[in-house]
Amino acid sequence: MKKIYSIGILLFCTGMLLAQMPANRTINTIIADALGQLPAKDAADYAKIIKEICSTGEEGVLQLADMISPPEKGLNTPVEYALSGLSHYVSAEGQESARLTTSNAYLKALDRTNDHEIKAFFIRQLEIMGKDEVVGKLSGYLTDPALSGPASQTLAAIGGTAVVEALLTALPNATDNKSKTNIVLALGDIQDTKAEVSLRELLKRLPNATDNKSKTNIVLALDDIQDTKAEVSLRELLKSDDENLEKAVLYALSRTGTKLSLPDLALAADRASYTMEKTGANEAYITLIKRALSQGSVKDAEKAANQLMAKAARAGKVQSRGAALQVLMAVNPAKTTQLLQKALKDTDRTYRNMALAYASEYADHTMYKALLKDLAKTDTDTKTDVIFWFGQLYNKQGNKDEAISVVLPVLIHLINDTDINVKSATALALVKSQDSRAIPVLASLLSDTDPEVVSISKNALASFNGNISSEVAKILPVA
């Protein structure tokens, strides 16, 4: 009985193997036919061709690999197209066996050519579908200036402990800045904290070097791994007159720095006149202020925000003023209402609306009452913006009930304001409330002699979910 089962299993497996290879077709024939059909007519045809190539196993992959010629000697497009399609095909879920076979074929193909361009192509295929099995082989290319780029990029895509160890081992052995840069960027992409020591040591050796491109790449890698211990070295690099390096350092410090770097970035922001420019100094300074606050350096963040507020105001930079105000509100939420009231007296409408937006996070009963009280003595533009802001609050979860209870009576009164913009903003806010008490007030506008007011009423009523018929009927005979 066991013998019968064994024979049955053997026949079944043999049948499967034969099914993978089209009848009476050799690997040479399958490869030749596949190349002759590329590019395919459609996606379904393409999938069928790639599946047939996959059925040829390692031998078929190596046969295709051997067809690739140096760029100056021939056109490789059909072959590269086929191999690229195969790489993506075997990387799909459920194709692990085919993936490993293809990966091992690429590793063998690397030893069958001395051309750097061809090797780089195979390495890029491994980036698509390679896993731990390729780490050992690719590690040998990390210190090769011609191949360190694709090799380090592929290893970074694979990631893991073995990759980090390979990169850290290769870093001190790299003799050229190009390879060092590629390795450092790979370490940064992996964001492994074990890379910190090597990166810091390399950074110490670079301030006196002339290769600013390598410095820049190392700085970006330090930023990627969020290495706060590199802050001192990064601050030293701010003395560079290379714009790209300065931009990288400022960006890295904004993401990895502490309160210690606030004075340095404040100077850089001042040189940038508190506006957007190539180095991103102002944005970096604002980001670092917020970071310092999140780290618990409240007093330092508050001091920096107040200084930014004053200097940005003198420079006429409203966006920076708004950013400073946002920090000050976060520093002391209890003072948000006071800060908002002061901001609403500013002559710049953009700044006023920024203040309203930032205050939304802290809006409460006290803030509503204070602003409603101020509406009577404020100018039309500010009044319109505040009313519109109230309308937005109705859409916010957690604010709706409180906003309706405090704000609605005032809005109902303001619907009779003589300014058309105030009237329009009020109508919109009442619609946002979806409170039935607003329906008769809005319906009363239908009898107004101003067509624009009537239009405001119609649009508002049409947006109400409740029954408006009875209230409208009371007005229509008069209209």
Image (cartoon, rainbow, N blue to C red):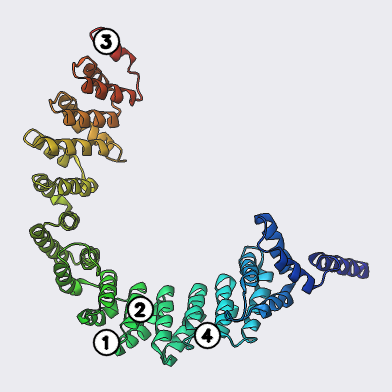
- Mark identifier at residue 139: 4
Q: Residues within 10 Å of mark 3 (few under 14, many from 20)?
A: few
- Work out whether mark 1 precedes mark 4 in sequence or the reverse, and give the earlier one: 4
Q: Residues within 10 Å of mark 1 (few under 14, many from 20)?
A: some
Q: CA distance from mark 1 to mark 4?
A: 28 Å
Q: Are marks 3 and 2 in contact (CB under 8 Å)?
A: no
Where is 360 relative to 57, above or below?
A: above
* Residue 336 x %, y %: 15, 49
Nearest to the observer: residue 1 or residue 124: 124
Callout 4 secondary element: helix
- Work out whether mark 3 precedes mark 2 in sequence or the reverse, and give the earlier one: 2
**Residue at image point 17% right, 52% down:** 333
Callout 3 secondary element: helix
- Work out whether mark 1 precedes mark 2 in sequence or the reverse, and give the earlier one: 1
**Residue type indicated by callout 4:** Ser
- Mark identifier at residue 474: 3
**Residue at image point 12% right, 64% down:** 303
Nearest to the observer: residue 340 or residue 418: 418
Callout 1 secondary element: loop
**Residue type indicated by callout 3:** Lys
Viewer can see residue 160: no
Q: Nearer the viewer, mark 1 or mark 4?
A: 1
Q: Residues within 10 Å of mark 4 (few under 14, many from 20)?
A: many
Q: Quadrant of residue 413?
A: top left
Residue at the disc numbered 2: 217
